[in-house]
Amino acid sequence: MDIEKQFNLIAEEYDCNRKKFIPCFDDFYKNTTEFIASNIDEPKRIIDLGAGTGLLTYFWYQQCPNSEYVLVDIADEMLNVARKRFHDIGNISYQVENYIHKLPDAIFDTVISALSIHHLEDEDKIKLFSKIYDRLPSGGLFINYDQFCAESAKMNLWFDSFWESSLANSGLTDQDIELWKERRKLDRECSVEQEVDMLKNCGFEVVKCVYSYQKFSVIVAIK
């Protein structure tokens, strides 16, 4: 089953279970977004790649309500959840697109993404980062909230084992966990250190991991 089918299948339940799947949910989404937004001018237009149900945009909108948002995702059913979430907000638009092949035509100064880019092979990550860099203005931002492997294979086993055991005690159903295991087969994780190097090699002037908790980290890159 491909990524589009996998995520369309769980669209309605996605947000409900997100806190159970991410043990550091509040720090990862809310607190890190507040930290970043407090240090920048409000962006003119934010592109959310792999936006899904609009969860990351929701937290950005709390901090930057006057920015324009373009939510991009390959799974239309996921975006339908986002459309319901933001049904009365006029500065949010949607694009059903595989962002690996095409970024939105609109001019933008900030790109955000959550738990999506780790599905790409490393060569496709690099191609995407290069496209983002080329399209951003000087001072533009790319912020990736994502899932990473540890640099050490042994430590990564620790991370994976602890994550799986925490899910078993989270209240998720057996079916939820089985679907998660199927989605995990689509993961192509790199380490934070590898991704930082990729972004630097694409030309970003400042690249910093500003939050990390085992599998989950947030990287900020400034052109």
Image: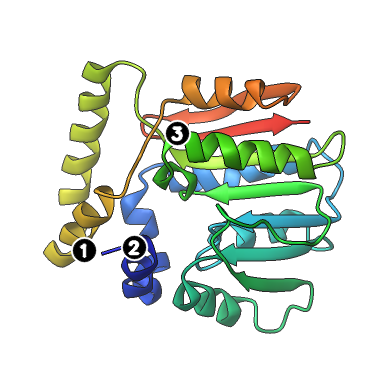
Question: Where residue 65 sits in the image (x, y, percent)?
Answer: 79, 62
Which circle's residue, 2 or 1, is located before the other in the chain?
Answer: 2
Identify the disc placed on residue 122: 3
Tell whether 196 sits left or right of 167.
Answer: right
Amino acid found under the numbered disc labelled 2 = Asn
Q: Name the residue under label 1.
A: 176
Amino acid found under the numbered disc labelled 3 = Asp
In the foreground, 79 or 130: 130
Question: Where residue 58 sits in the image (x, y, percent)?
Answer: 62, 62
Colour scheme in use: rainbow
In the displayed structure, would residue 170 be above or below residue 205?
Answer: below
Question: Where residue 114 sits in the image (x, y, percent)?
Answer: 52, 49
Identify the disc placed on residue 137: none
Question: Where residue 182 sits in the image (x, y, percent)?
Answer: 21, 56
Mark 2 in CB contact with mark 1 (< 8 angstroms): yes
Tell whether 31 sits left or right of 138.
Answer: left
Mark 1 in CB contact with mark 3 (< 8 angstroms): no
In the displayed structure, would residue 76 be above or below residue 176?
Answer: below
**Quarter where residue 56 is shown:** bottom right
Q: Name the residue under label 2.
A: 17
Q: Residue at x 75, y 43 (%)?
A: 37
